[in-house]
Image (tube, grey):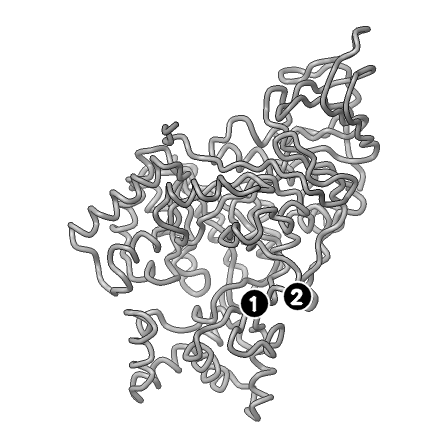
């Protein structure tokens, strides 16, 4: 990878030269690397001095007293990567966050897709007692709030119920939430109307929050889903993130041209809308995404009752088959790959086609629908859906308002069958889409991973290499950085990340994961408790 950079002795605001005769004292010095400050500007050749958790100097350090010196020759030094979409539910099982740290992630935003926890403050207090490998921040989830107030009811809320939900959102914002997330494709969010979401988003907006949306549809109803999210942002006066933006299902491939045009038009009209994206052409979610939402209202017991009704069962099967043909199923049951199947682990990594053939069935969408129904009756499953097109992926990645979000879940080798994004999102962008395919250049990629998400979350002292900022820093080899996790062999850590610092503490040293932990629970601007 050829990297343009400038040789400097002093650089504008935030850069201080240590080129005097007096020896400077630092806890750690990074010498001779190509520094990319994270704002989209070219890399520069410079040294960095760090004291405690803070960047103390950037410039030429000719002499220093330092406890540790890192030789970063031929390596790129950047701000720590900020993951705009992370599933941090297993934080108590994996507080070290190795699957994130080894990608260069130093801060992750949890609570996406309308999910999350309650009560908010108590949960954050519990996390803060853990020995965290990364910084974590959270959104309050619409689905979580709605389920606490309305259960799995398929109806609009009463005024009293809406009032309770608004109060919960406001309480979460005061407790440190960075905004509200929705998962309008999931339950019970799918049962909500746009007015409900606008009302709750106003409660988040009042406290400086953002709105991130798993759209109501990402396949056949994608355009309408984007329009709905933009409407919510406009009416609630809240910054929007179209999270894990993608185009699902062959009939819709190429529609990113339209969705990105909608984003551009909205921004021209003063609506603050951005996107995040993971760099893979397959998604991961519950197998239930293939099942019509109406038949799951009321929870699993009500679903089983409907399956027991022949007329309703036939309607459910038709709906599943339609989604296999036209939406998340990608038109072919071989595109559905099982990832978590607690009731039959022999299906891990195998496809719906494999299961059909094992059962002696012809691998048709109709028979696939029957097996999907069986899976849900047995308690559900998670799957990888190979139903996206790389041209849409590239187009979205190039858009100036797209940030990077892994949509990854904290994991470790031996746990089910994860999507490769859980291990490799950020190195894949830098290795495949920057170095190899040259879809975007390095400064642009780093900006999408650092300063853009930091600005969206109002993290004033993160996301840029600047004197006075927290020392969340990644040092990587631009020639070797790459994801190793694959759909057939997912439990593999990425390579090329040589050093990672979180709040000034070296967590990866010479490519090796250490026992050092310095992550913090970050809270949003409305938080004021001591």
Label 2 packing within 10 angstroms: few (<14), some (14-19), many (20+): some
The picture quadrant where one finds residue 497 is top right
Left-right relation of 138 to 409: left
Residue at the spot 70% in from the left edge and 46% down from the top edge: 430
The residue wearing badge 2 is 487
Mark 2 falls on what kind of element? loop
Front one among 145 and 325: 145
- Vertical order, 7 against 168 (above or below): above
- Vertical order, 291 against 137 (above or below): below
Q: Can residue 402 be seen here?
A: no
Q: Can residue 317 be seen here?
A: yes
Residue at the spot 33% in from the left edge and 37% down from the top edge: 205
**Furthest residue to the front?**
129
**Furthest residue to the top?**
21
Mark 1 falls on what kind of element? strand
| Residue 513 position in % (x across, y down) | 72, 45
Left-right relation of 147 to 222: left
Kindly identify which numbered label has been placed on residue 384. 1
Residue at the spot 75% in from the left edge and 50% down from the top edge: 495
Left-right relation of 73 to 461: right
The reply to whether dot 2 and dot 1 touch (C-beta < 8 Å) is yes
| Residue 56 position in % (x across, y down) | 66, 19
- Vertical order, 102 against 342 (above or below): above
């Amino acid at each position: 990878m050829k990297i343009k950079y400038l040789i400097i002795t002093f650089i504008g605001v935030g850069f201080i030269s240590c080129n005097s005769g007096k020896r400077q004292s630092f806890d750690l010095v990074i010498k001779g690397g190509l520094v990319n400050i994270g704002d989209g500007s070219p890399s520069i050749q410079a040294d960095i001095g760090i004291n405690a958790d803070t960047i103390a100097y950037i410039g030429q350090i000719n002499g220093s007293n330092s406890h540790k010196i890192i030789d970063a020759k031929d390596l790129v030094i950047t701000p720590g990567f900020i993951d705009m979409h992370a599933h941090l539910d297993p934080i108590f099982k994996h507080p070290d966050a190795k699957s994130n740290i080894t990608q260069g992630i130093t801060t992750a935003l949890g609570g996406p897709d309308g999910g999350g926890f309650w009560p908010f403050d108590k949960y954050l207090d519990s996390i803060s007692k853990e020995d965290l490998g990364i910084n974590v921040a959270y959104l309050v989830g619409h689905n979580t709030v709605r389920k606490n107030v309305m259960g799995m009811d398929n109806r609009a809320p009463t005024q009293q119920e809406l009032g309770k939900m608004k109060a919960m959102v406001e309480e979460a914002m005061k407790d440190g939430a960075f905004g509200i997330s929705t998962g309008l494709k999931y339950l019970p969010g799918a049962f909500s109307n746009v007015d409900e979401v606008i009302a709750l988003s106003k409660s988040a907006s009042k406290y400086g929050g953002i709105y991130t949306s798993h759209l109501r549809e990402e396949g056949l109803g994608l355009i309408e889903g984007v329009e709905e999210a933009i409407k919510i942002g406009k009416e609630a006066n809240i910054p929007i993130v179209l999270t894990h933006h993608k185009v699902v299902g062959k009939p819709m491939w190429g529609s990113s041209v339209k969705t990105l045009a909608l984003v551009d038009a909205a921004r021209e009209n003063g609506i603050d809308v951005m996107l995040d994206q993971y760099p893979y052409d397959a998604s991961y979610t519950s197998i239930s995404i293939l099942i019509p939402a109406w038949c799951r209202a009321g929870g699993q017991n009500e679903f089983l009752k409907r399956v027991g009704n022949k007329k309703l069962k036939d309607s459910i099967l038709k709906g599943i088959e339609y989604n296999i043909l036209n939406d998340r199923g990608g038109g072919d049951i071989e595109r559905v790959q099982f990832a978590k199947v607690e009731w039959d682990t022999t299906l891990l990594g195998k496809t719906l086609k494999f299961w059909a053939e094992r059962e002696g069935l012809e691998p048709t969408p109709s028979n696939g629908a029957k097996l999907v129904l069986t899976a849900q009756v047995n308690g559900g499953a998670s799957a990888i859906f190979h139903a996206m097109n790389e041209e849409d992926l590239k187009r979205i990645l190039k858009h100036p308002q797209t940030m990077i979000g892994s949509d990854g879940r904290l994991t470790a080798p031996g746990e089910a069958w994860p999507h490769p994004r859980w291990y490799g999102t950020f190195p894949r962008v830098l290795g495949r889409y920057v170095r190899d395919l040259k879809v975007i250049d390095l400064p642009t990629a780093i900006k999408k991973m650092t300063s853009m998400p930091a600005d969206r979350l109002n993290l004033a002292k993160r996301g840029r290499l600047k004197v006075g900022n927290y020392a969340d820093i990644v040092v990587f080899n631009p020639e070797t950085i790459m994801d190793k996790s694959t759909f057939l062999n997912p439990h593999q850590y990425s390579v090329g990340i040589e050093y990672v610092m979180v709040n000034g503490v070296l967590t990866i040293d010479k490519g090796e994961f250490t026992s050092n932990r310095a992550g913090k629970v970050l809270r949003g601007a409305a938080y004021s408790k001591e």
